[in-house]
Image (spheres, rainbow, N blue to C red):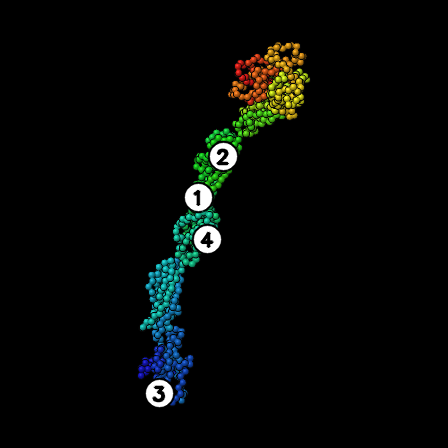
Amino acid sequence: MEAHRRGQPWRRYVSVFLIFSAALNVVSAVTHYTIPEEMEEGSVVANLAADLGLDVNTLSKREIRLDVVGNKKYLQINKDTGELYILEKMDRELFCPIKTASCFLKLDVTIENPIRMFNIELEIMDINDNTPHFRRDKMHVDISESTAVGERFSLNNAIDPDVGDNSVKTYHLSESNHFTLEIQTGRDGSKFADLILQTALDREQQEVHHLILTAVDGGVQARSGTANIIVRVLDTNDNAPKFDKESYNIEIMENSPIGSLVVKPNATDLDEGTNSVIVYSYSLYTSEKTHETFSLNPNNGEITVKEMINYEDFRIYDMEVIATDKGTNSLSGQCKITILVTDMNDNHPEISIKSYQSPIKEDIAVDTVIAVVSVSDKDSGENGIVDIHIADELPFALRESSDNYYELVVSEPLDREKVPEYDITFTVTDRGSPPLSDNETMTLELLDVNDNVPQFSQSFYTIPVMENNAPGALLSSLTAFDPDLHENQYLVYFIIEKEIVNTSISMLFSINPENGNLYALKTFDYEIEKEFLFHIEARDSGVPPLSSNVTVHIIIVDQNDNTPAIVSPWRVHGSVVEEKIPRSTDKGSLVSKVIAIDTDSVQNSRITYQFLQVTDATLFSLDQYNGDIRTMRMFSYRDPRHQRLVVIAKDNGEPALSATVTIKLSTVETAVKAYSDMTEVPLEYDIFSDLNLYLVIGLGSVSFLLLITILVTCVLKCQKPMPSIAAPPSRNSVISDRNSTIADSTLVSNDAYWYSMFLAETRKGKLVVRQPVPKAGSRYIVSSLPRSTGLTETSDSAASTLQGSTTTGSGSSSS
């Protein structure tokens, strides 16, 4: 019944159509019905039997065939009632996918017995059974942030299969400050929505805008569908890169390893994409030195050490780094970076000798500036403070003249002869930790000044010269030394002129002026000249010249060239000495005394006595040192009356020289007349022979020389302490006294032998001097004067000296 009621309105339409067809007198085989879509199954569309004039009662017996387009049965005829009902729901949008105002379903109905054919046209009316929907749930809209306000962006329209008012009627947009909708109607009546930019977009503030678009149809009960609109704000290069800091102050240690990171300035760009891709570079204001020293990574902005950093070359590096994006219209930002290099103690202090004098004179004044030096250190702070010093033992001092300048001055007197040159090492040390140092050596040469006198190796030269030397023989080399140099060192030697015994010293000696070799110009005889005393001067060639002299003592060394001469007992040459002695002479009595003298000296003049022949060796003895002949026993009647004694006097030279004397002793029974009476007998002139005349002349010469010797001896004695009175007389002295005593080699006797007192032997002959024996109480001395221990400037003029002095009482005489 419900299906029937639902189908009644459609019957009215069918009836109207049939009436309309009859009125037109047109018989149509098409039956038209109108139904809404989506009718429930079983709903009656119309009563065909009534509408087509069919007998309901016969329908059940007749064959009814209903053909639907598409061969799908949506409708069916009820044979019992003749009604056309809905077999399957029909969707208008399925039958009419193309959105049109009318949608028809055509049916062919065939009834048999009899056969009748009917065409039925079923118009399906739209109902609001579809919700508007969008083809995509999300719509992406890209809008550049530089898009001008009012710009229109088309959106996808919503789809609603319904037609008419049931289709999309309007759109709604979720609340937005930047967008609004504008609805457009198409020619077919469809609705479209455009998104309108109401305010400018800023991607950096909001990159994406989420909107909801709602499509609403016009049905009685409106339906709606939504879609998400994702508005992505497209970036435009409207933001310049910006650094975290406008300026950077970085400290870096010098000598930092190459490649080490200095700083990484960070720049950001609020844009995106290529607009935010930043490239770093140096600006044009960055120096070339900075480019060479530091490397800038263009991709990440890292600044690294490119080459070795030296504080002393460059202490501050200023650079400007630019960050540029890769946008079409690129923008850039910049920052300033100041790199401060921190000093390390990596530089040795330096010293520079600005000026100096070399060579300098050795007599340069103390406190004179001889050099100026400067010190420096490229480091800074304590690392750059430099201390300078030289060795303490040098005679120089450093004096600061100005900042980092020092003067080298003489602090002590200089002496080239001690140190000819100085290697002065300047040592500079900084105060870094650890300290570094350096040094510089300056060689200072001293020029010689004639400030040293020539110096002999000895202040007194004693040169022994053997007598009988060859003329021109080299005596010695008297070399002086002068520590000066060059002409100040060149020496010339001179003998200081003087006279010795009326003879110029230059006639006796000569010196080579160049080397100081001393030569004898004559042959010397010790027995005539025993010594010479003179001075030699050495003079340099400086200006003014300096000189010094030295005393030279030439000592003539004796040779054994003189034969001993027997002066007691005296006898004529070649004759025999005859002596008489009492036969009653006691044992040990002095019979005779042999005295020999030798004008040589020292060993050459030492005389020893020996019996060469003796009649009776048991009767006499001979003292080998003093020549005393004494009895060894008393005479006996058996002893011969005449005794012959041959005595040899031999010196101690090499080879030894000797002389002999023959003494013939005769014993008498009576006493011999006292010698005292004999000595008072005047000398007979006829005793002298022709030889005596020469002896007298020789004696005169000897006496003259003796006088000179005595005078010189007295002068020297006055200059020296007096010898002890108790000093023993010389061995070669012979003292005669009336009281006979023997001491050392000195004979004190009253014998007759002292009638001949002295024999002087010279190279030209012998001189015999005779004189009376001194009176009683007097003493007479015969002595060869010993060589003076002092220095005399004249030589002895004779080989021996005879000195006589007469004293009274028991006084003594000295020579």
How far is the residue under mark 4 from the one under mark 2? 51 Å
Dot 4 lies on which element? loop
Q: Give the labeled residue for mark 1.
A: 432
Above or below: residue 536 compared with residue 29:
above
Q: Give the labeled residue for mark 4.
A: 297
Q: Of callouts 1 and 4, which one flags the residue occurring earlier in the amino acid sequence?
A: 4
Residue drawn at 47 percent across, 36 percent down: 392
Q: Give the labeled residue for mark 3.
A: 80
Dot 1 lies on which element? loop
Q: Of callouts 4 and 2, which one flags the residue occurring earlier in the amino acid sequence?
A: 4
The one of 78 and 229 positioned closer to us in this rendering:
229
How far is the residue under mark 3 from the one under mark 1? 127 Å
Q: Quadrant of the C terminus?
A: top right
Amino acid tagged 3: Asp
Q: Of callouts 2 and 3, which one flags the residue occurring earlier in the amino acid sequence?
A: 3
How far is the residue under mark 4 from the one under mark 3? 97 Å
Disc 4 vs disc 3: which is toward the camera?
4
Query: How far from the left and from the top, in percent, is residue 771?
Result: 61, 13
